[in-house]
Amino acid sequence: MIVALMAVAATTAFAGNSPALKSILKAKTYADAASLLQSNLSQLANDQEKAAAYNKLVELAMVKVQHENATIATNQAVKQMGNGKEEPVDSIGLYTSLINALDAAVECEKYDQKPDAKGKIKPKFHENNSKRIYEHRGILANAGITCYQNNDAKNAYKYFAKYVDMHSEPLFAEEEAKAQADRKAKGIAEDPDNTAQFAYLAAYYAYQNKDIDACNKYCELAMKDEKWAKEARNLKLTVVQESLKTREDSINYTRSLESQLAATPDDENLFGTLVSMYNGLKMNAEMDALFNKKLQSDPNNFIVWAVRGQNAMLDQKLDEAVEYFKKALSTQPENAQILTYLGACQLDRASAAANRAAGKTGRVPEAAMAQIRPIYEEALGYLQKAKELDPKKEKANWGYPLYRCCYQLYGDEDPRTKAAEADTH
């Protein structure tokens, strides 16, 4: 009996690969191996066989990666030498194969790090997969940039996200550590891999693709870098604002903004977002208090004067609106929207003065018009400047107030009025 048991144990210990693994290892193409692995995964004998099967996928995917990379290198040499013929490069095949290799390597790592029958962890494929895939990570960045240039939001997100994820994947921890140590030794403080920038782009395209969870994930990663923290925070604020459903949601969000602004008082976008929330929720007392505090440190703050001007204009407090808009304009003299608002307010002031002067007669006395005309002319100057800065009316609709100004100053038959009328369409 003892001899029989020993024989069985020996057979188990020294058994070869299972039929399922043998069929996968014999596959000649990635597609064949992937299909066999998918249909036979449960038939593989243990975690070590599963690791070997996924490693086979890595090897087959890397054949394509290496072939296309070799073609690129040859083409570069041909171009430098000035003779020979460049060969076509299958860029899509290159990008797809690298992602296939990356995904298979991550799955391989999952099983490769599990203990064997004796309870020991002896990774067989970790080192090779880590090195051979990590060194090609730049391909994913280039793929994302290509899709970005082609306005391909879906694939731009895929490649940028994969690139960023590689830098936090345990499989590549040693390679990441080596790269960071090398940068430190060379005195390189910046992020040469542009991980934060690509994290922001991944977040942006996730937002475009309406994947809010992914957007927030990559925003958080980008915010860890000082260069991209502001852009990532702005994007995250946009996402949060769009998710607000009730007034209670908005109030809670506003309180969160207040806390964030207290921690980073110089963040103008955060300040502007809080102002927008106060304005929308009609929290006028809180907004005035915020403005007064801001003006103590920044008397010419554009947001304060622009928002105060808009609110005064809506309340038909035209004298105040003009005063506030002029202060905003002193900070941003080429802001087409403020120029348009200022021109429109001056136009309305002049029109109101003309109506008062005309009274029941319907005609403005010459003496009164002599005092009113400069206000019309000032309005016209602002509106013409807005037109010059924003000819396609992408930022401000200056067309109709400009026409009204010309009508009042020159009459309806004047060529200048006719030209302005054409701009109203």
Image (tube, rainbow, N blue to C red):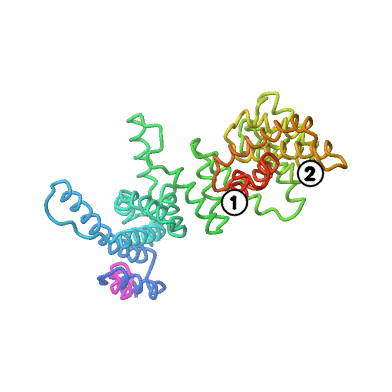
Q: Position of residue 279 (x, y in %)?
A: 74, 42
Amino acid found under the numbered disc labelled 1: Ala
Q: Quadrant of the N terminus?
A: bottom left
- Along the line of sight, which residue is nearer the eye, 207 or 58? 207
Is 392 on the left or on the right of 2, as rendered?
Answer: right
Q: Residue at x 30, y 64 (%)?
A: 56
Is 198 included in the stretch rendered in magenta?
Answer: no
Does 16 appear in magenta? yes
Give whichever of 333, 35 is nearer the camera.
333
Pointer 1 and pointer 2: residues touching (CB < 8 Å)? no
Question: Residue 330 sits in which quadrant?
Answer: top right
Measure how far apart labels 1 and 2 are at the Cα level.
38 Å
Residue 308 coordinates in the image, percent (x, y): 73, 35
To which residue does mark 2 refer? 282
Please indicate whether residue 359 sits to the left or right of residue 150 in the image.
right
| Kind of residue at badge 2 | Lys
Label 1, on which residue?
Answer: 422
Residue extent of the magenta highlight: 8-25
Q: Is the residue 265 above or below the residue 212 in the image? A: above
| Other-residue count near label 2 (Cα within 10 Å), few / some / many at <14 / 14–19 / ≥20 | few
Q: Measuring from the top left, give residue 334's x and y in whole percent.
A: 57, 34
Q: Which mark is residue 354?
A: none
SS category of the residue bearing label 2: loop
Secondary structure category for the residue under label 1: helix
Residue found at x 26% / y 62%: 64
Q: Nearer the viewer, mark 1 or mark 2?
A: 1
Residue furthest to the left in view is 83
